[in-house]
Image (tube, rainbow, N blue to C red):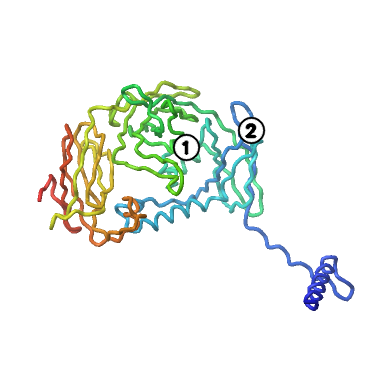
Amino acid sequence: MKSFSFVALMLATSAVFAQLGGTASQPAVPAPAAAPTLFGQVNGRVICGDTDAPGRFASVQLISEKAEQMGFSNFDPTKNPDFAKSLSVVFSTMLKGSNLSALAGIDGSFSLDKVPPGTYYVVAQLPGYQSPLSQLSQTERMKADPATLKAVESVAEKIVVGPEQAAHVEVRLERGSSLSGSVRYDDGSPAPCVTPILISLQKDGKWKELALSMMAAPTDDRGHFRFSGLPPGKYAVKAALPTTQASSGLGTASIAVHMNLGDALVVYPGGALREKDIKPVEVGSGDEVDGIEVIFPLSGLHAIAGTVVAKFDNHPVNAGAIALLDSETKAVVRTAMLDREGGFRLNYIPEGSYTLKVSGAADTEKSESPMEETDFARMMNSKTVKSYGEAERTLTLKTDETTITLQVPDAKGKAPAGNPTP
Protein backbone atom coordinates (compact mmCIF):
# COMPACT_ATOMS: atom_id res chain seq x y z
CA MET A 1 0.00 0.00 0.00
CA LYS A 2 2.90 2.42 0.76
CA SER A 3 4.55 1.87 -2.64
CA PHE A 4 1.17 2.44 -4.36
CA SER A 5 0.64 5.70 -2.48
CA PHE A 6 4.14 6.90 -3.43
CA VAL A 7 3.57 6.18 -7.11
CA ALA A 8 0.21 7.93 -7.00
CA LEU A 9 1.86 10.92 -5.31
CA MET A 10 4.55 11.11 -8.01
CA LEU A 11 1.93 10.98 -10.78
CA ALA A 12 -0.11 13.72 -9.16
CA THR A 13 3.00 15.90 -8.71
CA SER A 14 3.93 15.43 -12.36
CA ALA A 15 0.45 16.49 -13.39
CA VAL A 16 0.71 19.67 -11.30
CA PHE A 17 4.08 20.58 -12.83
CA ALA A 18 2.68 19.97 -16.30
CA GLN A 19 -0.20 22.36 -15.59
CA LEU A 20 2.26 25.01 -14.31
CA GLY A 21 4.35 24.82 -17.44
CA GLY A 22 6.78 22.07 -16.42
CA THR A 23 10.43 22.45 -15.41
CA ALA A 24 13.55 23.22 -17.44
CA SER A 25 14.32 19.56 -17.79
CA GLN A 26 10.64 18.60 -18.41
CA PRO A 27 9.12 21.02 -20.94
CA ALA A 28 5.34 21.20 -21.12
CA VAL A 29 3.63 19.39 -23.97
CA PRO A 30 1.24 21.77 -25.77
CA ALA A 31 -2.42 20.75 -25.74
CA PRO A 32 -3.85 19.64 -29.07
CA ALA A 33 -5.87 22.26 -30.90
CA ALA A 34 -9.62 22.00 -30.37
CA ALA A 35 -11.49 20.55 -33.31
CA PRO A 36 -13.74 23.07 -35.02
CA THR A 37 -17.42 22.69 -34.24
CA LEU A 38 -19.87 21.92 -37.02
CA PHE A 39 -22.78 23.64 -35.27
CA GLY A 40 -24.13 27.15 -35.26
CA GLN A 41 -26.06 29.11 -32.67
CA VAL A 42 -29.44 30.86 -32.70
CA ASN A 43 -30.56 33.29 -30.04
CA GLY A 44 -33.23 35.95 -29.77
CA ARG A 45 -36.37 37.17 -28.02
CA VAL A 46 -40.10 36.62 -28.24
CA ILE A 47 -42.22 39.79 -27.97
CA CYS A 48 -46.00 40.06 -27.56
CA GLY A 49 -47.12 42.47 -30.26
CA ASP A 50 -50.18 43.80 -28.41
CA THR A 51 -48.32 44.73 -25.21
CA ASP A 52 -44.63 44.87 -26.20
CA ALA A 53 -44.07 42.64 -23.17
CA PRO A 54 -41.78 39.60 -23.33
CA GLY A 55 -43.30 36.35 -24.58
CA ARG A 56 -42.54 34.66 -21.30
CA PHE A 57 -42.00 30.90 -21.56
CA ALA A 58 -43.10 30.75 -25.19
CA SER A 59 -41.98 27.63 -27.03
CA VAL A 60 -39.61 28.28 -29.93
CA GLN A 61 -38.92 25.81 -32.72
CA LEU A 62 -36.65 25.87 -35.75
CA ILE A 63 -38.28 24.15 -38.71
CA SER A 64 -35.85 23.14 -41.42
CA GLU A 65 -36.83 23.95 -44.99
CA LYS A 66 -36.02 20.26 -45.56
CA ALA A 67 -38.01 18.96 -42.62
CA GLU A 68 -38.23 15.18 -42.26
CA GLN A 69 -41.58 13.54 -42.80
CA MET A 70 -42.95 11.24 -40.16
CA GLY A 71 -44.09 8.61 -42.66
CA PHE A 72 -47.65 7.88 -41.58
CA SER A 73 -48.57 6.04 -44.78
CA ASN A 74 -48.04 2.70 -43.00
CA PHE A 75 -49.39 3.80 -39.64
CA ASP A 76 -52.65 1.88 -39.90
CA PRO A 77 -52.44 -1.13 -37.51
CA THR A 78 -55.13 -2.96 -39.49
CA LYS A 79 -53.10 -2.83 -42.73
CA ASN A 80 -49.49 -2.68 -41.61
CA PRO A 81 -48.10 -6.00 -40.30
CA ASP A 82 -45.01 -4.21 -38.96
CA PHE A 83 -46.96 -1.66 -36.93
CA ALA A 84 -44.64 -1.82 -33.90
CA LYS A 85 -41.61 -0.95 -36.05
CA SER A 86 -43.45 1.97 -37.65
CA LEU A 87 -44.36 3.24 -34.19
CA SER A 88 -40.70 3.09 -33.16
CA VAL A 89 -39.66 5.07 -36.25
CA VAL A 90 -42.23 7.74 -35.48
CA PHE A 91 -41.00 8.28 -31.94
CA SER A 92 -37.35 8.27 -33.05
CA THR A 93 -38.13 10.97 -35.61
CA MET A 94 -39.92 13.03 -32.97
CA LEU A 95 -36.85 12.97 -30.72
CA LYS A 96 -34.40 14.02 -33.43
CA GLY A 97 -35.53 17.62 -33.25
CA SER A 98 -34.73 18.06 -29.55
CA ASN A 99 -31.79 20.38 -30.34
CA LEU A 100 -34.00 22.59 -32.51
CA SER A 101 -36.46 23.72 -29.87
CA ALA A 102 -36.25 25.83 -26.74
CA LEU A 103 -38.37 27.50 -24.10
CA ALA A 104 -38.07 31.26 -23.76
CA GLY A 105 -37.13 32.57 -20.33
CA ILE A 106 -38.99 34.99 -18.09
CA ASP A 107 -37.54 37.86 -20.15
CA GLY A 108 -38.63 36.29 -23.45
CA SER A 109 -35.08 35.39 -24.50
CA PHE A 110 -34.03 32.02 -25.89
CA SER A 111 -30.86 30.35 -27.11
CA LEU A 112 -30.12 27.25 -29.18
CA ASP A 113 -26.46 26.22 -29.07
CA LYS A 114 -26.18 23.16 -31.31
CA VAL A 115 -27.95 23.98 -34.54
CA PRO A 116 -26.82 22.12 -37.68
CA PRO A 117 -26.05 24.51 -40.56
CA GLY A 118 -29.04 25.14 -42.79
CA THR A 119 -32.06 27.30 -43.51
CA TYR A 120 -34.82 27.41 -40.92
CA TYR A 121 -38.17 29.00 -40.18
CA VAL A 122 -38.48 30.31 -36.62
CA VAL A 123 -41.85 29.50 -35.04
CA ALA A 124 -42.87 30.69 -31.58
CA GLN A 125 -46.03 29.54 -29.83
CA LEU A 126 -47.75 31.06 -26.80
CA PRO A 127 -51.38 30.52 -25.71
CA GLY A 128 -53.62 33.29 -27.01
CA TYR A 129 -51.30 34.30 -29.85
CA GLN A 130 -51.33 33.35 -33.52
CA SER A 131 -48.81 30.82 -34.78
CA PRO A 132 -47.86 29.76 -38.33
CA LEU A 133 -48.87 26.26 -37.23
CA SER A 134 -52.35 27.16 -35.95
CA GLN A 135 -54.13 26.38 -39.24
CA LEU A 136 -52.45 22.99 -39.73
CA SER A 137 -53.90 19.59 -38.97
CA GLN A 138 -51.92 17.10 -36.92
CA THR A 139 -51.26 15.04 -40.05
CA GLU A 140 -49.89 18.10 -41.85
CA ARG A 141 -47.59 18.88 -38.94
CA MET A 142 -46.21 15.35 -38.93
CA LYS A 143 -45.82 15.02 -42.70
CA ALA A 144 -44.15 18.40 -43.26
CA ASP A 145 -44.69 18.08 -47.00
CA PRO A 146 -43.85 20.93 -49.46
CA ALA A 147 -47.38 22.39 -49.27
CA THR A 148 -47.20 22.56 -45.47
CA LEU A 149 -43.74 24.16 -45.50
CA LYS A 150 -44.96 26.72 -48.01
CA ALA A 151 -47.77 27.70 -45.66
CA VAL A 152 -45.28 28.14 -42.81
CA GLU A 153 -42.83 30.05 -44.99
CA SER A 154 -45.44 32.68 -45.87
CA VAL A 155 -45.74 33.87 -42.26
CA ALA A 156 -42.63 32.70 -40.35
CA GLU A 157 -39.25 34.41 -39.96
CA LYS A 158 -36.54 32.79 -42.12
CA ILE A 159 -32.91 32.50 -41.02
CA VAL A 160 -29.71 30.92 -42.32
CA VAL A 161 -27.38 29.23 -39.83
CA GLY A 162 -23.74 28.56 -40.68
CA PRO A 163 -21.07 26.52 -38.83
CA GLU A 164 -19.57 28.37 -35.87
CA GLN A 165 -21.88 31.32 -36.55
CA ALA A 166 -24.53 32.95 -34.38
CA ALA A 167 -27.86 34.14 -35.76
CA HIS A 168 -30.14 36.52 -33.88
CA VAL A 169 -33.88 36.81 -34.42
CA GLU A 170 -36.75 38.67 -32.75
CA VAL A 171 -40.17 37.06 -33.04
CA ARG A 172 -43.25 39.23 -32.56
CA LEU A 173 -46.47 37.42 -31.75
CA GLU A 174 -49.87 38.82 -32.64
CA ARG A 175 -52.82 38.09 -30.37
CA GLY A 176 -55.47 35.95 -32.01
CA SER A 177 -59.23 35.67 -31.76
CA SER A 178 -61.10 33.23 -29.54
CA LEU A 179 -64.04 30.85 -29.72
CA SER A 180 -65.71 29.57 -26.56
CA GLY A 181 -68.85 27.81 -25.38
CA SER A 182 -70.04 24.69 -23.61
CA VAL A 183 -70.77 21.00 -24.12
CA ARG A 184 -73.82 19.50 -22.41
CA TYR A 185 -76.50 16.81 -22.65
CA ASP A 186 -79.97 17.66 -23.89
CA ASP A 187 -81.40 17.38 -20.36
CA GLY A 188 -79.31 20.45 -19.44
CA SER A 189 -76.57 18.71 -17.46
CA PRO A 190 -72.96 19.69 -18.32
CA ALA A 191 -70.57 17.29 -20.07
CA PRO A 192 -67.20 17.52 -18.27
CA CYS A 193 -63.97 15.83 -19.40
CA VAL A 194 -64.87 16.18 -23.08
CA THR A 195 -62.02 17.17 -25.40
CA PRO A 196 -63.55 19.44 -28.06
CA ILE A 197 -61.92 19.57 -31.49
CA LEU A 198 -61.71 22.78 -33.48
CA ILE A 199 -62.36 22.41 -37.20
CA SER A 200 -61.82 24.97 -39.94
CA LEU A 201 -63.74 25.36 -43.20
CA GLN A 202 -61.35 25.27 -46.15
CA LYS A 203 -61.67 27.03 -49.52
CA ASP A 204 -62.68 23.75 -51.14
CA GLY A 205 -65.64 23.43 -48.76
CA LYS A 206 -64.08 20.65 -46.68
CA TRP A 207 -63.60 20.71 -42.93
CA LYS A 208 -60.16 20.21 -41.39
CA GLU A 209 -59.33 19.26 -37.79
CA LEU A 210 -56.75 21.66 -36.40
CA ALA A 211 -53.79 20.35 -34.42
CA LEU A 212 -54.09 23.07 -31.79
CA SER A 213 -57.10 21.08 -30.50
CA MET A 214 -54.59 18.61 -29.03
CA MET A 215 -53.29 21.35 -26.73
CA ALA A 216 -56.76 22.45 -25.61
CA ALA A 217 -57.96 21.57 -22.14
CA PRO A 218 -60.95 19.25 -21.69
CA THR A 219 -64.23 20.82 -20.68
CA ASP A 220 -64.38 21.83 -17.03
CA ASP A 221 -66.99 20.76 -14.49
CA ARG A 222 -69.50 23.13 -16.12
CA GLY A 223 -68.74 21.81 -19.61
CA HIS A 224 -67.00 25.00 -20.70
CA PHE A 225 -64.27 25.18 -23.37
CA ARG A 226 -62.25 27.92 -25.07
CA PHE A 227 -59.98 28.09 -28.12
CA SER A 228 -57.67 31.08 -28.49
CA GLY A 229 -54.94 32.39 -30.77
CA LEU A 230 -57.08 31.99 -33.89
CA PRO A 231 -56.55 33.85 -37.16
CA PRO A 232 -59.65 35.10 -39.01
CA GLY A 233 -61.62 32.27 -40.59
CA LYS A 234 -64.70 30.06 -40.50
CA TYR A 235 -64.81 27.55 -37.67
CA ALA A 236 -66.91 24.97 -35.86
CA VAL A 237 -66.40 22.69 -32.87
CA LYS A 238 -67.04 18.98 -32.68
CA ALA A 239 -67.13 16.83 -29.58
CA ALA A 240 -67.35 13.11 -28.89
CA LEU A 241 -68.88 11.41 -25.88
CA PRO A 242 -66.15 11.04 -23.22
CA THR A 243 -65.91 7.27 -23.60
CA THR A 244 -62.10 7.39 -23.44
CA GLN A 245 -60.76 8.57 -20.10
CA ALA A 246 -57.94 7.96 -17.65
CA SER A 247 -58.66 7.32 -13.98
CA SER A 248 -56.40 7.16 -10.96
CA GLY A 249 -56.67 5.22 -7.73
CA LEU A 250 -54.38 3.45 -5.27
CA GLY A 251 -51.85 0.65 -5.41
CA THR A 252 -50.63 -1.16 -8.49
CA ALA A 253 -53.71 -0.17 -10.49
CA SER A 254 -53.31 3.51 -9.65
CA ILE A 255 -53.67 4.58 -13.28
CA ALA A 256 -56.12 3.05 -15.74
CA VAL A 257 -57.22 4.06 -19.21
CA HIS A 258 -60.77 3.27 -20.27
CA MET A 259 -61.16 3.32 -24.05
CA ASN A 260 -64.19 2.52 -26.16
CA LEU A 261 -64.06 4.23 -29.55
CA GLY A 262 -67.13 2.31 -30.61
CA ASP A 263 -69.27 4.50 -28.33
CA ALA A 264 -67.81 7.86 -29.34
CA LEU A 265 -70.85 9.69 -30.72
CA VAL A 266 -69.70 12.91 -32.44
CA VAL A 267 -71.88 16.02 -32.29
CA TYR A 268 -71.54 19.51 -33.81
CA PRO A 269 -73.06 22.86 -32.74
CA GLY A 270 -76.73 23.42 -33.44
CA GLY A 271 -77.56 19.75 -32.92
CA ALA A 272 -75.86 18.66 -36.17
CA LEU A 273 -74.79 15.02 -36.29
CA ARG A 274 -73.10 15.13 -39.71
CA GLU A 275 -70.55 17.46 -41.27
CA LYS A 276 -72.90 18.43 -44.11
CA ASP A 277 -75.29 20.00 -41.57
CA ILE A 278 -72.69 22.19 -39.84
CA LYS A 279 -73.27 25.95 -39.83
CA PRO A 280 -69.83 27.61 -39.59
CA VAL A 281 -69.06 30.53 -37.29
CA GLU A 282 -67.07 33.31 -38.93
CA VAL A 283 -64.39 34.84 -36.69
CA GLY A 284 -62.75 38.14 -37.57
CA SER A 285 -59.48 39.66 -36.39
CA GLY A 286 -59.54 40.21 -32.63
CA ASP A 287 -63.05 38.76 -32.21
CA GLU A 288 -64.02 36.90 -29.02
CA VAL A 289 -66.96 34.73 -29.94
CA ASP A 290 -68.83 33.06 -27.06
CA GLY A 291 -71.99 30.99 -26.69
CA ILE A 292 -71.11 28.03 -28.92
CA GLU A 293 -73.22 25.08 -27.74
CA VAL A 294 -72.59 21.41 -28.47
CA ILE A 295 -75.41 19.21 -27.19
CA PHE A 296 -75.39 15.41 -26.90
CA PRO A 297 -78.82 13.82 -27.51
CA LEU A 298 -80.03 11.23 -25.02
CA SER A 299 -82.70 9.66 -27.23
CA GLY A 300 -83.01 8.48 -30.83
CA LEU A 301 -79.74 6.56 -30.63
CA HIS A 302 -79.27 2.87 -31.44
CA ALA A 303 -76.79 0.00 -31.11
CA ILE A 304 -75.15 -2.16 -33.77
CA ALA A 305 -73.62 -5.47 -32.71
CA GLY A 306 -72.70 -8.80 -34.18
CA THR A 307 -69.98 -11.31 -35.01
CA VAL A 308 -67.37 -11.73 -37.72
CA VAL A 309 -66.85 -15.32 -38.87
CA ALA A 310 -64.75 -17.12 -41.49
CA LYS A 311 -66.83 -17.89 -44.57
CA PHE A 312 -65.51 -21.40 -45.14
CA ASP A 313 -66.51 -22.86 -41.74
CA ASN A 314 -68.24 -20.03 -39.80
CA HIS A 315 -65.81 -20.01 -36.89
CA PRO A 316 -65.39 -16.58 -35.21
CA VAL A 317 -62.17 -14.75 -36.08
CA ASN A 318 -60.44 -13.18 -33.10
CA ALA A 319 -58.76 -10.12 -34.66
CA GLY A 320 -59.75 -7.32 -37.00
CA ALA A 321 -61.32 -3.87 -37.18
CA ILE A 322 -64.90 -2.76 -37.73
CA ALA A 323 -65.72 0.57 -39.37
CA LEU A 324 -69.13 2.21 -39.71
CA LEU A 325 -69.30 4.53 -42.72
CA ASP A 326 -71.92 7.07 -43.73
CA SER A 327 -73.50 5.60 -46.86
CA GLU A 328 -73.76 8.99 -48.55
CA THR A 329 -70.42 10.64 -47.76
CA LYS A 330 -68.38 7.47 -47.06
CA ALA A 331 -67.00 9.24 -43.99
CA VAL A 332 -66.03 6.96 -41.08
CA VAL A 333 -68.58 7.42 -38.31
CA ARG A 334 -67.23 4.91 -35.80
CA THR A 335 -64.56 2.23 -35.43
CA ALA A 336 -63.97 -0.70 -33.07
CA MET A 337 -61.72 -3.73 -32.68
CA LEU A 338 -63.06 -7.27 -32.70
CA ASP A 339 -62.93 -9.08 -29.38
CA ARG A 340 -61.52 -12.58 -28.83
CA GLU A 341 -64.79 -14.18 -29.92
CA GLY A 342 -65.09 -12.13 -33.09
CA GLY A 343 -67.71 -9.90 -31.56
CA PHE A 344 -68.20 -6.15 -31.89
CA ARG A 345 -70.61 -3.53 -30.57
CA LEU A 346 -71.18 0.10 -31.50
CA ASN A 347 -73.46 2.19 -29.31
CA TYR A 348 -75.14 5.60 -29.59
CA ILE A 349 -75.65 5.53 -33.38
CA PRO A 350 -78.15 8.05 -34.84
CA GLU A 351 -80.73 6.86 -37.35
CA GLY A 352 -79.56 6.79 -40.94
CA SER A 353 -78.04 4.74 -43.74
CA TYR A 354 -74.64 3.18 -43.14
CA THR A 355 -72.10 0.72 -44.49
CA LEU A 356 -70.59 -1.70 -41.98
CA LYS A 357 -67.13 -2.89 -43.04
CA VAL A 358 -64.62 -5.31 -41.53
CA SER A 359 -60.93 -5.23 -42.46
CA GLY A 360 -57.73 -6.83 -41.20
CA ALA A 361 -59.66 -9.93 -40.10
CA ALA A 362 -57.39 -12.73 -38.89
CA ASP A 363 -57.02 -15.78 -36.71
CA THR A 364 -54.26 -15.16 -34.17
CA GLU A 365 -52.59 -17.29 -31.54
CA LYS A 366 -54.49 -16.93 -28.32
CA SER A 367 -52.53 -15.89 -25.24
CA GLU A 368 -53.52 -16.42 -21.63
CA SER A 369 -51.26 -13.58 -20.49
CA PRO A 370 -53.14 -10.99 -18.40
CA MET A 371 -51.01 -8.33 -20.11
CA GLU A 372 -52.79 -9.09 -23.40
CA GLU A 373 -56.36 -8.74 -22.19
CA THR A 374 -57.00 -5.53 -24.12
CA ASP A 375 -57.82 -5.57 -27.82
CA PHE A 376 -54.93 -3.20 -28.58
CA ALA A 377 -52.42 -5.40 -26.71
CA ARG A 378 -53.58 -8.46 -28.62
CA MET A 379 -53.26 -6.59 -31.92
CA MET A 380 -49.68 -5.60 -31.10
CA ASN A 381 -48.45 -8.88 -29.62
CA SER A 382 -50.43 -11.72 -31.20
CA LYS A 383 -49.03 -13.81 -34.02
CA THR A 384 -51.26 -14.10 -37.09
CA VAL A 385 -52.12 -17.67 -38.07
CA LYS A 386 -54.46 -16.92 -40.98
CA SER A 387 -55.58 -13.70 -42.68
CA TYR A 388 -58.92 -13.00 -44.35
CA GLY A 389 -60.35 -10.59 -46.90
CA GLU A 390 -62.77 -7.74 -46.30
CA ALA A 391 -66.53 -7.93 -45.96
CA GLU A 392 -69.27 -5.33 -45.71
CA ARG A 393 -73.01 -4.80 -45.63
CA THR A 394 -75.33 -1.84 -45.84
CA LEU A 395 -78.09 -1.14 -43.36
CA THR A 396 -80.72 1.50 -42.69
CA LEU A 397 -80.78 2.02 -38.94
CA LYS A 398 -84.13 2.78 -37.34
CA THR A 399 -83.82 0.51 -34.32
CA ASP A 400 -81.13 -1.59 -32.64
CA GLU A 401 -79.36 -4.14 -34.91
CA THR A 402 -77.62 -6.59 -32.61
CA THR A 403 -77.60 -9.93 -34.48
CA ILE A 404 -75.45 -9.08 -37.50
CA THR A 405 -73.14 -11.73 -38.95
CA LEU A 406 -70.37 -10.78 -41.35
CA GLN A 407 -68.57 -13.58 -43.20
CA VAL A 408 -65.00 -12.90 -44.32
CA PRO A 409 -63.46 -14.92 -47.17
CA ASP A 410 -59.89 -16.11 -47.53
CA ALA A 411 -57.53 -13.24 -48.27
CA LYS A 412 -57.62 -13.97 -52.04
CA GLY A 413 -61.37 -13.53 -52.46
CA LYS A 414 -63.88 -10.81 -51.72
CA ALA A 415 -67.04 -11.22 -49.72
CA PRO A 416 -70.33 -10.45 -51.46
CA ALA A 417 -72.38 -7.46 -50.34
CA GLY A 418 -75.28 -8.01 -48.01
CA ASN A 419 -75.60 -9.97 -44.80
CA PRO A 420 -74.76 -13.61 -45.57
CA THR A 421 -75.89 -16.14 -43.05
CA PRO A 422 -74.44 -19.56 -42.28
- Mark 1 Cα shell of 10 Å, populated few (<14), some (14-19), many (≥20): few
Based on the displayed image, in which of its 4 quarters is residue 242 positioned?
A: top left
Q: CA distance from mark 2 to mark 1?
A: 22 Å
Q: Are marks 2 and 1 in contact (CB under 8 Å)?
A: no
Based on the displayed image, in which of its 4 quarters is residue 223 positioned?
A: top left
Q: Is residue 420 left or right of residue 271?
A: left
- Between discs 2 and 1, the one toward the N terminus: 2
Of all residues, the one furthest to the front in this rendering is 251
| Residue 406 visible in rendering | yes
- At label 1, the amino acid type is Met
List x then y, in percent, for residue 146.
44, 46
Which mark, by number, is residue 54? 2
Q: Is residue 89 left or right of residue 393?
A: right
- At label 2, the amino acid type is Pro
Judged from the image, the secondary structure of the residue bearing numbered disc 2 is loop
Which mark, by number, is residue 88? none
Based on the displayed image, in which of its 4 quarters is residue 139 positioned?
A: top left
Q: How many numbered badges does the structure rendering display?
A: 2
Task: Report which residue position mark 1 lands on.
Answer: 215
320 or 280, which lies in front? 320
195 or 48, which lies in front? 195
List x then y, in percent, for residue 382.
31, 59
List x then y, in percent, for residue 422.
10, 51
List x then y, in percent, for residue 13.
83, 70
- Mark 2 Cα shell of 10 Å, populated few (<14), some (14-19), many (≥20): many
Residue 407 vertical position relative to residue 365 in the rendered view, above or below: above
| Residue at image point 27% right, 59% down | 366
| Residue 145 visible in rendering | no
Quadrant of image for the N terminus: bottom right
